[in-house]
Image: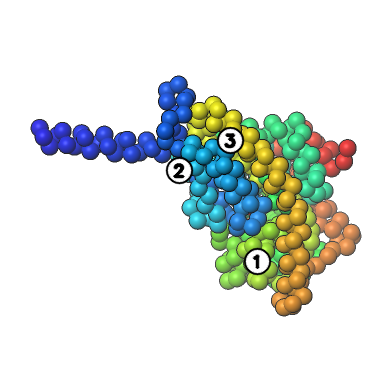
Amino acid sequence: MIRILSIALALLVLTACDNSQQPATSPHGEHNALPIKIKFSHVVAESTPKGIGANKFKQLVEQRLAGKVIVEVYPNSQLYGDDKEMEALLLGDVQLIAPSLAKFGKYTKKLQVFDLPFLFDDIHAVERFQKGTLGKQLLSAMAGQNFIGLGYWHNGMKQLSANKPLRIPADAKGLKFRIQHSDVLQTQFETLGANPQKLAFAEVYNALQTGVVDGAENPWSNIYSKKFHEVQKYFSETNHGVLDYLLVTSTQFWNGLPPKIRTELEKILNEVSEEVNKLALDVEAQDRQKVLDFAKQTSKTEVLTLTKEELAQWREVMKPVWQKFEADIGKDVIEAAIMANQSP
Ligand code: LMR
């Protein structure tokens, strides 16, 4: 009898400990004594727009919700790589992530619009689209799957890299390119006659260094912070696509928060999103310059500026990709993105 009682007691204690990980709400949604823990996991360096945004979020939460919410940030795929972070969010192991928009294909086809090559002229067009009616609607494209989109964060436009100069599309033929987990990006490289390989971000440096792949596509902040310029001989400034993020949480976590705390977190996230989206262009310019400096000092790499005619060739060859994904994405969504290229 005593043995049964002690086992029951041990189980009770264990259950109580486990509950400490859950939002500290009473059945009435009031906040009780335990701080709510938000784990924010991401795969990039702290110096990138996403890294800066995650740390800023932590700082503001700890100022404004001291004692009520604590934030732990795990950068550089320390906790989860990008193959696992979405599952971890759905399982409640992390509460905030900001994967690249390219990585949601398993959950929605709509966000594929962001991967279409040469759709957006620049990051300002991307921003106009995200702030427009359809862009805002896409934030809830995965509502039925327990994901709530809380905002878009910019990184920047992507550049192509390889160990041979890529000036025209034919230069990419037969090369192996690392891509994010995106069917659009797969088709983009297949259209060039190249061999795309889906790899997690944490594996890119080694894959480039060891020759598992010959090239990649990345924005400047990811290139510089992960030292891809040390293992790629040429960068072509193509700006052929965007790499931006969707900040997401799980519906279960978000709706389980005490309303006042949720409102304050929303305010903070909106503030941080504005800030990230303002500073992304500066980070991009600075990191581009650092790669240029490295190229000048070491001659180990080179940044190629393409002519208008060369760029037109890339655009022409990649354009059929749009058609292939139009039915999945929606013609209206693609048209709204095209319209966003016109500044008001
Ligand atoms: C990549 O996998 O190349 C990017 O999505 C990484 C990131 O989060 O910027």
287 w.r.t. 15: above or below = below
Instruction: Residue type at mark 3: give it.
Output: Leu
Dot 3 alpha-carbon crowd within 10 angstroms: few under 14, some 14 to 19, many 20 or more? many
Q: Which residue is mark 3?
A: 265
Q: Quadrant of the N terminus?
A: top left
Instruction: Residue type at mark 2: give it.
Output: Asp
Label 3 and label 1: CA atoms lie apart by: 35 Å
SS at badge 3: helix
Q: Which residue is mark 1?
A: 228
Instruction: Residue type at mark 1: give it.
Output: Phe
Q: Nearer the viewer, mark 2 or mark 3?
A: 3
Q: Earlier in the sequence, mark 1 or mark 2?
A: 2
Residue drawn at 63 percent across, 32 percent down? 140
Instruction: Name the image quarter holding residue 124.
Output: top right
Q: Nearer the viewer, mark 3 or mark 1?
A: 3
**Mark linked to residue 93:** 2
Residue 213 appears left or right of 239: left
SS at badge 1: helix
Does residue 85 appear in the picture of this structure? no
Where residue 187 appears, as percent x and y from the top left, is 69, 51
Residue 188 appears left or right of 66: right
Between 299 and 166, the one nearer to me in the picture: 299
Q: Quadrant of the C terminus?
A: top right
**Mark linked to residue 189:** none
Residue drawn at 73 percent across, 67 percent down? 290
CB of residue at label 3: within 8 Å of ligand 1?
no
Dot 1 alpha-carbon crowd within 10 angstroms: few under 14, some 14 to 19, many 20 or more? many
Q: Earlier in the sequence, mark 3 or mark 1?
A: 1
Marks 1 and 2 in Cβ contact (< 8 Å): no
Residue drawn at 84 percent across, 58 percent down? 311
SS at badge 2: loop
